[in-house]
């Protein structure tokens, strides 16, 4: 992944567009995380601090990811910072958000952040899928490995984030935020929680402890066992198709959800 472009490296015309909207930028910090953008900045002015993301219009996949994030923002404001504006200038697509002065979640076993993350995921369940067909069904992501009946099994009306890695989980004042909604999907209500439990195992949680954390989600506890098994198989088959033997450890964690 290429390093993110800093504020001073952006075209002068682009910086002018930003400052016309927010005022003179007094300080700018580059945020290194994020793969769907080419610049990510915390900008401070005399009156406010904001988070700015940008991608070249020519980078179609990144720009489309940002447009998705912009279009879905109003639907997810219960758990995500509000987007303030969107602009296209000098070959770049920009989106600006309220700044959350927080830190990335610590998912290691000794951390207390897992409870805050669980609360954020539960609050996210009240977010509703926006109209207009913007959000694709989860099964579409795995269409190359689906078997007959899998698509129907993975149907659901819940709005899913699908990428709950720690960089997308911010914690500020003991409140969790779920950011970077660039890959939303519709599907079973328990998917984000299940994927997060797998991430907990990846950070050192024992499978039984990750399952205990997951058991606090009623959607998972009451879900059909066959549906869970289909989800685990489909995700594992897809990972193997993309990464071969490198996917074995992650796949083992997914299968541990079912034990």
Image (cartoon, grey):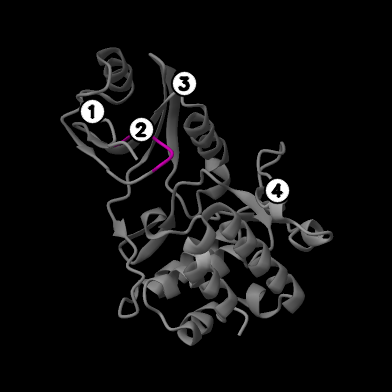
Q: Position of residue 115 (x, y in %)?
A: 42, 75
The answer to whether one can see residue 68 in this image is yes
The answer to whether one can see residue 196 in this image is no
What secondary structure is marked by label 1? loop
Mark 4–mark 3 Cα distance, whole angstroms, equals: 25 Å
Disc with the residue nearer the chain's start (1 vs 2): 1
Disc with the residue nearer the chain's start (1 vs 3): 1
The residue indicated by pointer 4 is 140
Disc with the residue nearer the chain's start (3 vs 2): 2
Q: Are marks 4 and 2 in contact (CB under 8 Å)?
A: no
Between residues 249 and 23, which one lies in front from this camera angle? Answer: 249
Q: Are marks 1 and 2 in contact (CB under 8 Å)?
A: no
Q: Position of residue 131 (x, y in %)?
A: 70, 40
Q: Residues within 10 Å of mark 3 (few under 14, many from 20)?
A: few
Question: Residue 90 falls in which quadrant of the image?
Answer: top left
Question: Residue 20 falls in which quadrant of the image?
Answer: top left
What secondary structure is marked by label 3? loop
Q: Residue at x 42, y 47 (%)?
A: 81
Mark 4–mark 2 Cα distance, whole angstroms, equals: 27 Å
Q: Residues within 10 Å of mark 4 (few under 14, many from 20)?
A: few
Instruction: Tell us which disc is closer to us: 1 or 2.
Output: 2
Q: Disc number at residue 7? A: 1
What secondary structure is marked by label 4? helix
Q: Is residue 35 above or below residue 219?
A: above
Instruction: Provide the major secondary structure of the magenta segment.
Output: loop
What secondary structure is marked by label 2? loop
Q: Disc number at residue 58? A: 3
């Amino acid at each position: 992944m290429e390093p993110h472009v800093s504020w001073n490296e952006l075209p002068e015309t682009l910086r002018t567009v930003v400052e016309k909207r927010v005022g003179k930028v007094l300080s700018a910090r580059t945020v290194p995380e994020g793969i769907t953008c080419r610049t990510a900045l915390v900008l401070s002015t005399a009156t406010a601090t904001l988070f700015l993301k940008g991608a070249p219009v020519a980078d179609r996949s990144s720009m489309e990811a940002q447009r998705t994030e912009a279009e879905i923002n109003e639907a997810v404001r219960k758990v995500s910072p509000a987007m303030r504006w969107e602009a296209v200038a000098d070959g770049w697509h920009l989106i600006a958000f309220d700044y959350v002065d927080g830190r990335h979640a610590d998912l290691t076993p000794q951390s207390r952040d897992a409870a805050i993350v669980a609360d954020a995921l539960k609050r996210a369940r009240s977010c509703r899928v926006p109209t207009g067909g913007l959000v694709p069904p989860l099964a579409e992501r795995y269409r190359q490995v689906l078997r007959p009946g899998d698509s129907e099994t993975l149907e659901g009306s819940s709005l899913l984030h699908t990428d709950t890695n720690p960089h997308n989980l911010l914690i500020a004042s003991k409140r969790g935020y779920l950011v970077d909604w660039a890959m939303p999907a519709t599907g079973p209500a328990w998917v984000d929680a299940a994927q997060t439990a797998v991430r907990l195992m990846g950070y050192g949680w024992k499978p039984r402890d990750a399952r205990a954390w997951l058991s606090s989600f009623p959607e998972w506890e009451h879900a059909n066992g066959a549906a869970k098994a289909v989800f685990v198989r489909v995700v594992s088959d897809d990972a193997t198709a993309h990464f071969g033997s490198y996917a074995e450890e992650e796949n083992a964690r997914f299968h541990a959800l079912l034990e």
